[in-house]
Amino acid sequence: MQDFDMKTIAIIPARYGSSRFPGKPLADIGGKPMVRRVYEQVSRCALVDAVFVATDDERIARCVEDFGGKACMTSPELPNGTSRCWQAYQKVVRSIGRFDVLLNVQGDEPFIEPQALVSLLELFNDRAVGIATLKKKISLPEELFDANVVKVLSGKDGKAACFSRFPLPFQRDLPFERDRETALRWMERADYFKHVGIYAFRPEVLTDLVELPSGKWEEAEKLEQLRWMENGYVVHVRETAYESLSVDTPSDIRKIMDVKGC
């Protein structure tokens, strides 16, 4: 681990009203509500000084407080988790002071690895880094053409060139058929990386980001980070071996519990 002398806050946005899975943060996973598992995993990160859950629902806030965590109420009108993190951070600043780095961890990652968070936060030892995230090499051919698996293309300098639901780079000289055989041929020609949706920001950068209007790139791909890039913000990316295990639907819980042996 590199030396790290910055004060870091982790904020976990957690909504009750998911269209595909209402009440998802309170779903039981091996005897604990999912939001508690996320909170405990993030708290194990050696570089995190404070952890808060940002929620618009009193039931989630009570659950967090019942297991000894800290919750911050946010407006139900906010458009996304990034805005929820920003609003929660503004409230935290008024009560306990400022932080150097803000870590945004999705509330549906009950087994997020603390070491992956360390790897991400260490990027901020470079003062030029304002936004950072993670990527993982795609090893399963079925993920390559899956539009639900967001891909990231980044340069040797560690800066993201593009995020897309389409695999980049495009293999001009190979067939484009959305099948396993084609995917394997593409993966023989180039390394492809999926985006691991964990972000860290310098708070002053995040303050600017939430004021940006949606742009054409974001509207096309439905990816918020493209709004930032279209406006000239640089997203730094670090590779990780961490395999994201997120919960989108109730059936995902059994899959994750089988993987983790819960």
Image (cartoon, grey):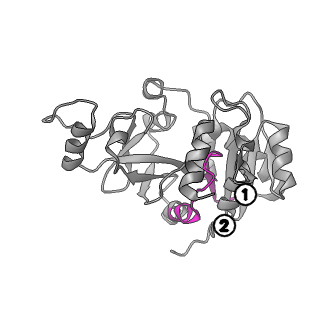
**Viewer-proximal residue among 161 and 164:** 164
Horizontally, is 262 left or right of 89 in the view?
left
Query: Can you name the residue that lies furthest to the left here?
Result: 173
Image position of 121 (left or right of 138):
right
Q: How far apart are marks 1 and 2 (CA)?
A: 10 Å
Would residue 248 be counted in the magenta stretch?
no
Q: Position of residue 80 (x, y in %)?
A: 63, 34
Q: Which of marks 1 and 2 is nearer the N terminus?
A: 2
Name the amino acid, label 1. Val
In x, y percent, where is residue 224? Answer: 52, 34
Is 53 situated above or below 41? above
Q: Name the residue under label 1.
A: 51
Kind of residue at disc 2: Arg
Find the magenta span and give its range: 99-119
- Residue at the disc numbered 2: 44
Q: Residue at x 37, y 55 (%)?
A: 158
Q: Residues within 10 Å of mark 2 (few under 14, many from 20)?
A: few
Position of residue 6 relative to residue 249, above or below, is: below
Secondary structure under the numbered disc 2 in the rendered image:
loop
- Name the spot of residue 131 as percent of width and height, x first: 51, 50
- The residue located at (34%, 51%) in the rendering is 139
Residue 201 can be seen, yes or no: no
112 on left or right of 30: left
Residue 49: percent from the left, percent from the top? Answer: 70, 65
The number of numbered badges drawn on the structure is: 2
Q: Residue at x 71, y 42 (%)?
A: 25
Mark 1: secondary structure: strand
Q: Quadrant location of the C terminus?
A: bottom right
